[in-house]
Amino acid sequence: MNQRTLIALHHLNGAIKHKVEGMQLQHDLDRKAAAYGWVMGFLAEHEGEDIYQRDLERELHICRSGISKLVASLEQNQLIERSKVASDDRVKKIVLTERGKAIIEQIRSESEQLESALTRGFSEEELAMLHSFLNRMQSNLNNET
C-alpha cells in the first residue's frame, strides 16, 4: 500500500469518526457510544445465540482487556446483562437488555443514514468492488508475518 492510500484511508476514517461523534446517540450515552454500538450490534445480530466475551474479542478484533472494560461499562449502563450458563459455571453469556434493544434500533437508524451518505452516487458494482478492495486490504494486514 502506498502512502497516498494510507493517507486517504486515514482522512476517511477521521471524517467517519467526526460524523459518528455528532450523532444523537453519542450525546445520549457518553463518549464510548461508538464502541458500544459495535458490541451491541453484534449482540443484536446474534440474538438467541449464546454469546460470550471471547466471541466479542474474536469477532470485533478487540483485545481481552478492552472487551472486559466495554462489557463492564455496558453492564453498568444497563445495556447488557451477563447470565450464567447451566453447562459451564466459568462463563457467562452476554445479552442485550430491553434498554439495550431500544438503543440498538437508534444505532441502526443512524448507521443507515451514515451508510447512505457514504455510498451516495455509487453503483452496486462499484460498491461490490470497494468491499472487495477493503476486504483484501484487511486480509493483507491480517496475513502479515
Image (cartoon, grey):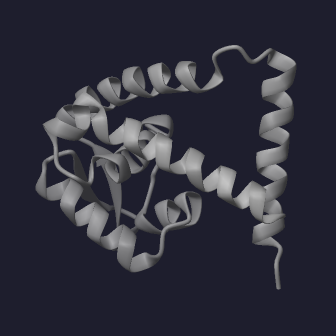
Write down the quadrant of residue 124 in the picture.
Answer: top right
| Closer to us: 97 or 126 | 126
The C terminus - image quarter: bottom right
Q: Is residue 1 visible?
A: no
* Residue 90 in the figure: left or right of residue 31: right
Mark yes or no: residue 85 visible: yes
Q: Residue at x 65, y 52 (%)?
A: 9
Task: Report x, y in % for residue 21.
Answer: 31, 42
Q: Residue at x 49, y 68 (%)?
A: 62
Residue 30: percent from left, percent from top: 17, 49
Front residue (pair 4, 38): 4
Q: Quadrant of the N terminus?
A: bottom right
Between 58 and 107, the one lying in front of the other is: 107
Q: Image quadrant of residue 28?
A: top left
* Left/right of residue 57 with respect to residue 106 in the rendered view: right
Q: Check the image and report above or below for 58 versus 115.
A: below
Up-down relation of residue 49 to residue 56 (above or below): above
Q: Position of residue 10 (x, y in %)?
A: 59, 56
- Name the side, left or right, on which 49 lies relative to 27: right
**Residue 108's spot in the image, x, y percent?**
41, 26
Query: Looking at the image, which residue is at 18% across and 56% down?
Result: 75
Which sits in the foreground, 90 or 115?
A: 115
50 on left or right of 143: left
Residue 129, located in which quarter of the rendered image? top right
So how many labels did they put on this image? 0
Q: Which residue shows up at 28% across the image and 47% down it?
A: 33
Outermost residue toward the bottom in this view: 145
